[in-house]
């Protein structure tokens, strides 16, 4: 470890990618292609679980990483520790690129990086006693002698809020919250600088979760720890983090200081997430606006901004001069056609359902008219393609990948991947 | 007061295990009225799911309903009487299992479970399962049942329902599967749906979609809901009235606004203090000390007293039934002797020292194997 780098961020991730190939066997990758030529084609599809992520974590801070299931947050957490081999990109940990380390060097950095998993049950060996579980990492890194390890294990058990007398008990004798404390003690045993916490409290009941979160905070101060805290729960993230990164479909869409992110979100996805969570206050009930649709397939993510297919604030194509009402009507119609959400009777009925009080002219009007013809002829696919090509694909959101550094009200800059912030 | 749609009185369900009798539900009472959504809240092990299964008669051996009365629209579904030898047995007014199955479950009282993968058969298509359910419960010929099934799928916002009809459960996402279960529940237009943590396994945006869908459907059909959850935020969002359970018993029962703004039970208060909030930054959480004891050997007196910040000596002796402690006309029940309604001289009782250390009383190791 080079001491000179102590001033910089503890971790800097640059354009990190982790792709998984979907085929597992020899024949999974072979596809029948009858379009001419040799009829067998080798095709490997890649799930782009993490696709070009860059950020920094400062010493002693907690960076919250939030996103829905399947967005790649756990993969990112594991790739940072090189539990998974990155496909591309660099991970500078205390100034050294650990993406390039060999096995032996990597093993030595493990002493400074630890991980805590979601399921406190399956991450503890049921046949081992708690004391030896906590000592295991010290043994692996050749720290202390036998007596020293035992002493430290007992100290750590006490530090995480367990009784040192429980050294000789088995994991099954503890409750879920206590097991997560054992995991904490084990992670701390090698005196790490950085801990990746992957949904550490998601499996716990509300009252127990609060106990564990409080303990994690106290330990952070006591042991001078840096956390990457991964969770799907925005309330927990808001409680524990200093800065927050929001992930969607393999990319970070927004990164900002906690208060700023929650009080003044700059990305439509963050806004949608925040408005979707129910609040434990009945006077605020029913004020939700909900994101429609599902997350797209990470094998073929949308071009440009990945959130555009569900974005409530999709930017209208510059080529047409549409006002807000017209653009909203077009998008509503496009969505309904894609989902076949209505039973069309005749043109007038369709027009009054979607374009009541809106008059489209010029090219957009002609496209919509065409699309209605196809819908009436039950050619839903053709209509969908027509509308997508003429409207959705023409938006800047579909054509350029967004990435904007914004002025922060608090300190320095914040990041939002949304074209609404273009100059 | 009109007759409640569902009324549960002093329900007791227990499980006989090698280690002893587990009183999972120990004498709870609650009502559900037409068109309302009633929350049943508590941490894991509180007995919420067992309560729901008991109403539906889905409790399996070694579990058994051993007491209480359940009425639906005034009709007795289940009651008990004293037998000739003083033992408790089901009274003759109780509906037989067969009658219950044919007349009540599915048609009048439907259910939505937490895990949609376990509730759907993986080897049959979504459509065929829904269609079968409609054929049996609405006695429709297959063709009509198919049309109803597709219509219902459209209603719960499944895109391209005609195409998706022949898909298998694994081809649906979690949120979509939960929609299918909702479709199945509403297909027979029941008057009551018992939902057991239906959104717990889902992402926030999907949960939001489902909650919106449920309130839309409720508006359309006037269906009543019992919503079982551990999530106070969901309760605040959709419930009209709330029942808070702790270790098999009712702690507090109130209108949702009263429950959050004028909390009367220390357990509810502690729960509210212990959850982080999405809408404001809470600097420090106040956790509830200790862990919920096991139902096999509940604490004497009030079951919450070992973890309760307001506990006094009298709490060790008296196990209070919920009583009305409201200052207004709306009923607000709390099972806590600190209220005057209980008259056990709480005022002069000595406070119990809390035994927790700085990390909370989590030190008590749960004994025995599980």
Image (cartoon, rainbow, N blue to C red):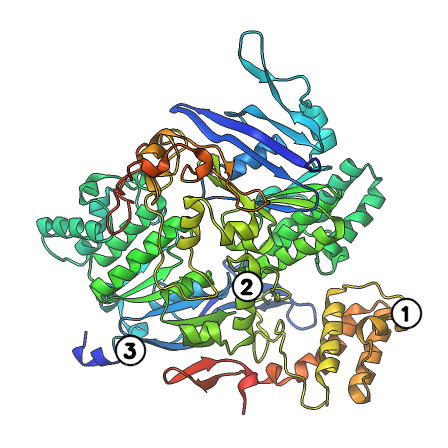
**Could you give the CA–CA distance between mark 2 and mark 3, rounded to whole angstroms?**
41 Å
Give the quarter of the image for residue A103: bottom left
User: Which residue is disc 3 drawn over?
Assistant: A9
Give the vertical position of B327 relative to B281 (above or below).
above
User: Which residue is disc 2 drawn over?
Assistant: A29
Q: Residue at x 71, y 75 (%)?
A: A331
Q: Looking at the image, do the residues carrying marks 2 and 3 touch, with CB atoms under 8 Å apart? A: no
Secondary element at image label 1: loop
Subunit under mark 1: A
Q: In the rendered image, is residue B344 in sight?
A: yes
Of the image marks 3 and 1, the number of the one nearer the N terminus: 3
Q: Are marks 3 and 1 on the same chain?
A: yes
User: Which residue is disc 1 drawn over?
Assistant: A346
Give the vertical position of B139 relative to A318 (above or below).
above
Of the image marks 2 and 1, the number of the one nearer the N terminus: 2
Give the quadrant of the C terminus of chain B.
top left
Of the image marks 2 and 3, the number of the one nearer the N terminus: 3
Subunit under mark 2: A
Image coordinates for residue A161, horizontal then vertical, percent: 24, 50
Q: Residue at x 60, y 32 (%)?
A: B8
Image coordinates for residue A365, horizontal then vertical, percent: 81, 84
Q: Nearer the viewer, residue B166 or A333?
A: A333
- Relative placement, left or right, of A284 versus B5 is left
Subunit under mark 3: A
Q: Residues within 10 Å of mark 1 (few under 14, many from 20)?
A: few
Give the vertical position of A40 relative to B149 (above or below).
below
Q: Residue at x 58, y 66 (%)?
A: A295
- Relative placement, left or right, of A284 versus A99 is right
Q: Nearer the viewer, residue A68 or A138?
A: A68
């Amino acid at each position: 470890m080079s001491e000179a780098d102590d001033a910089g961020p503890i971790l800097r991730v640059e354009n990190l990618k982790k792709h998984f190939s979907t085929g597992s066997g020899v024949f999974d990758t072979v596809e029948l292609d009858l379009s001419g030529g040799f009829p067998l084609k080798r095709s490997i599809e890649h799930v782009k679980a993490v696709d070009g992520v860059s950020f920094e974590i400062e010493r002693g801070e907690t960076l919250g990483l939030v996103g829905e299931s399947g967005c790649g947050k756990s993969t990112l957490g594991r790739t940072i520790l090189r539990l998974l081999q990155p496909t591309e990109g660099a991970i500078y940990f205390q100034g050294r690129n650990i993406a390039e380390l060999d096995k032996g060097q990597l093993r030595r950095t493990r002493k400074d990086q630890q991980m805590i998993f979601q399921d406190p049950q399956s991450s503890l060996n049921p046949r081992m006693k708690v004391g030896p579980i906590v000592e295991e990492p010290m043994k692996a890194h050749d720290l202390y002698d036998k007596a020293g390890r035992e002493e430290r294990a007992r100290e750590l058990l006490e530090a995480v809020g367990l009784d040192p007398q429980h050294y000789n008990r088995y994991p099954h004798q503890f409750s879920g919250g206590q097991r997560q404390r054992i995991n904490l003690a084990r992670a701390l045993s090698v005196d790490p600088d950085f801990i990746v916490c992957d949904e550490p409290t998601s499996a716990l009941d509300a009252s127990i979760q609060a106990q564990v979160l409080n303990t994690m905070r106290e330990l952070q101060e006591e042991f001078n720890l840096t956390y990457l805290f991964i969770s799907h729960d925005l309330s927990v993230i808001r409680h524990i983090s200093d800065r927050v990164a929001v992930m969607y479909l393999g990319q970070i869409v927004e990164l900002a200081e906690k208060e700023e992110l929650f009080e003044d979100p700059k990305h439509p996805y963050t806004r949608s997430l925040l408005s979707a969570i129910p609040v434990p206050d009945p006077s605020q009930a029913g004020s939700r606006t909900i994101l429609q649709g599902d997350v797209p397939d990470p094998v073929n993510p949308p071009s440009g901004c990945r959130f555009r297919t569900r974005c409530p604030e999709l930017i209208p194509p510059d080529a047409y001069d549409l006002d807000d009402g017209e653009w909203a009507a077009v998008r509503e119609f496009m969505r309904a056609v894609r989902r076949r959400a209505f039973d069309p009777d005749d043109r007038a009925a369709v027009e009054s359902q979607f374009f009541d009080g809106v008059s489209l002219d010029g090219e957009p009007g002609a496209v919509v008219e065409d699309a209605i013809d196809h819908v009436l002829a039950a050619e839903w696919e053709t209509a969908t393609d027509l509308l997508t090509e003429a409207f959705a694909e023409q938006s800047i959101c579909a054509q350029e990948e967004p990435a904007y550094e914004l002025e922060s009200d608090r300190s320095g800059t914040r990041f939002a991947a949304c074209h609404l912030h273009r100059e | 007061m009109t007759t409640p749609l569902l009324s549960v009185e002093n329900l007791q369900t227990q499980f006989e295990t090698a280690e002893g009798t587990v009183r999972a539900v120990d004498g709870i009472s609650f009502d559900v009225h037409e068109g309302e959504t009633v929350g049943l809240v508590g941490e894991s092990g509180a007995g919420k799911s067992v309560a729901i299964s008991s109403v539906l008669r889905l409790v399996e051996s070694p579990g058994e309903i051993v007491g209480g009365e359940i009425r639906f629209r005034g009709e007795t579904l289940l009651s008990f009487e004293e037998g000739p030898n003083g033992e408790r047995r089901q009274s003759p007014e109780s509906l037989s299992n067969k009658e219950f199955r044919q007349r009540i479950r599915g048609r009048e009282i439907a259910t939505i479970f937490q895990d949609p993968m376990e509730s759907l058969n993986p080897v049959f298509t979504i459509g065929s399962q829904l269609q079968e359910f409609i054929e049996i419960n609405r006695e429709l010929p297959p063709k009509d049942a198919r049309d109803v099934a597709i219509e219902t799928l459209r209603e719960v916002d499944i895109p391209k329902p005609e195409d998706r009809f022949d898909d298998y459960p694994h081809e649906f996402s979690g949120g979509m599967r939960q929609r299918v279960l909702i479709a199945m529940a509403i297909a027979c237009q029941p008057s009551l749906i018992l939902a057991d943590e239906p959104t717990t396994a889902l992402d926030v945006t999907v949960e939001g979609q489902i909650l919106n869908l449920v309130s839309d459907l409720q508006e359309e059909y006037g269906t009543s809901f019992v919503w079982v959850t551990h999530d106070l935020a969901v309760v605040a969002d959709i419930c009209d009235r709330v029942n808070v359970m702790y270790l098999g018993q009712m702690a507090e029962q109130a209108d949702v606004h009263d429950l959050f703004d004028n909390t009367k039970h220390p357990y509810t208060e502690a729960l509210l203090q212990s959850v982080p909030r999405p809408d404001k930054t809470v600097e420090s959480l106040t956790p509830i000390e200790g862990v919920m004891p096991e139902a096999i050997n509940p604490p004497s007196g009030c079951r919450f007293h070992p973890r309760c910040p307001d506990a006094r000596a009298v709490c060790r002796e008296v196990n209070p039934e919920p009583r009305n402690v409201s200052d207004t006309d709306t009923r607000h029940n709390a099972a806590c002797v600190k209220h005057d309604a209980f008259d056990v001289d709480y005022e002069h009782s000595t406070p119990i020292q809390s035994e927790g250390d700085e990390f909370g009383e989590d030190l008590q190791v749960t004994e025995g194997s599980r």
